[in-house]
Image (spheres, rainbow, N blue to C red):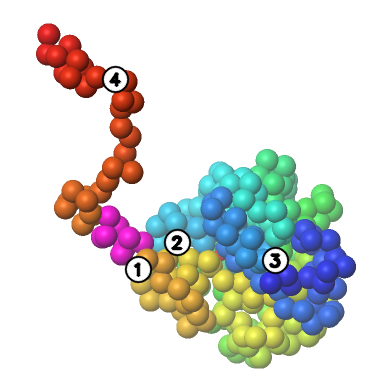
Amino acid sequence: MAYLKPDQPEKVYVPALRPAKERGEKLACLTAYDYPTARIVDEAGVDIILVGDSMGNVIHGYGNTIPVSLDEILSATKAVKRGANRALIVSDMPYGSFHTGDNKAVSNALKLLKYGGAEAVKLEGGRNRVGLVKRLVDEEIPVMAHIGLTPQSVHKLGGYRVQGKTTDDAQRLIEDAKMLEEAGAFAIVLELVPREIAEIITREVKISTVGIGAGPSCDIQVLVLHDLIGFTFGRQPRFVRQYANVSKVITDAISEWMDDVRSGEYPNESESYGMPEKVKLDELISTSAR
Ligand code: KIV
C-alpha cells in the first residue's frame, strides 16, 4: 500500500513528512540492518527505514545498544541503501559517536550520509542535545530526535521503563520536544511514554512524532522488524504486536532439511549434477586405479 499521495514523488524525502502530518496521514517506519530485509520492507511500502542501534540486541546479541559501533551502523546502512529504493533511510548515531564534542559528532554523521547513503540521522537525547541538533541541521544533516526511553541511557535509568509518568517528568518531555523542534529536528521518536503525553506532544509540535510504545496518536509508528515478525528471543514489551513467527518458520525448515539429509532424501537427482554422457565413467575409474 502506498502511504503518500500519488501527486508526491514516489521516493520519500524528509520534506514529505510535514504535509503527511497536516493531512492526518499515518506513516510507517521499520528497522532494517541488511540488504534482504531492507528490500522486503521497502517493497512492502514502508515509508521510513531506520537502521537502528537496536541491531545490538536483535542481530549482534549484545544484550543492549551500548556496544554498537559507528562501523556497524555504517556497514548496515550501506547494505540497506542497496536494498531500498523508496523509503527514507535514517541511520542511528550509536552510543559514543556524538558524545565527545560536536565536531566529532558532525564528522560521524557525515560518514553515515556520505559513505553509507543515509538520508538523515537519529540521535537520543532531549534539551542536552539541542545545540548539537542545530549544528547538524546547519551542516545539511536532517535529524530525527529521540526522547522518552532512550536505551543508550540504560545504565543511568537503571532499566527500560515507561518515562514521563510524573507531572514534572511529563512537562520536561513536552518541553524537550518543543526545544528539539525549535533546534530543527524534522521528527521526534517518542519511546515508551504514556499515550496521553504522546498525544499532547503530537498536537503541540508541527514536526512528526514517531511512536514506539507511545500509543496511537503519533504521526508515525515505528517497530523493530524482528519483533513484528517474531524473530527475537525472550519476552516482548506489551506494545509489540507479533504478526508472524519467523523463528518457527526457520526452525521447521531446518528440522525438515535435517530429516531429509539423515534419511538420504536430500539431495535428489535434480538437486545435483551428472557427468556428460560422452565421458565414460568406466574409463575414469580404470584410469584413476592405475
Ligand atoms: O534502534 C532502534 O531501533 C530505535 C527504535 C526502537 C526507535 O531506536
Please tell me whether mark 3 or mark 4 is closer to you in this view. Answer: 4
The residue shown at (64%, 75%) is 221
Residue occupying the point 49% across, 76% down: 243
Question: How many other residues sit within 10 Å of disc 2, few (<14), some (14-19) or many (≥20)?
Answer: some
Q: Residue furthest top?
A: 290
Q: Amino acid at mark 1?
A: Lys
Q: Residues within 10 Å of mark 4 (few under 14, many from 20)?
A: few
Residue span colored magenta: 250-257
Which circle, 2 or 4, is nearer the viewer? 4
Badge number at residue 248? 1
Amino acid at the residue labelled 4: Val
**Mark 2 vs 1, N-terminal side:** 2
Q: Tell me the SS state at disc 3.
A: loop
Whichever of labels 3 and 2 marks the residue nearer the N terminus, that label is: 3
Q: Name the quarter showing ligand 1.
A: bottom right
**In the drawing, does residue 187 fall left or right of residue 161?**
right
Q: What secondary structure is marked by label 1?
A: helix
Give me the C-alpha separation between circle 3 and circle 1: 28 Å
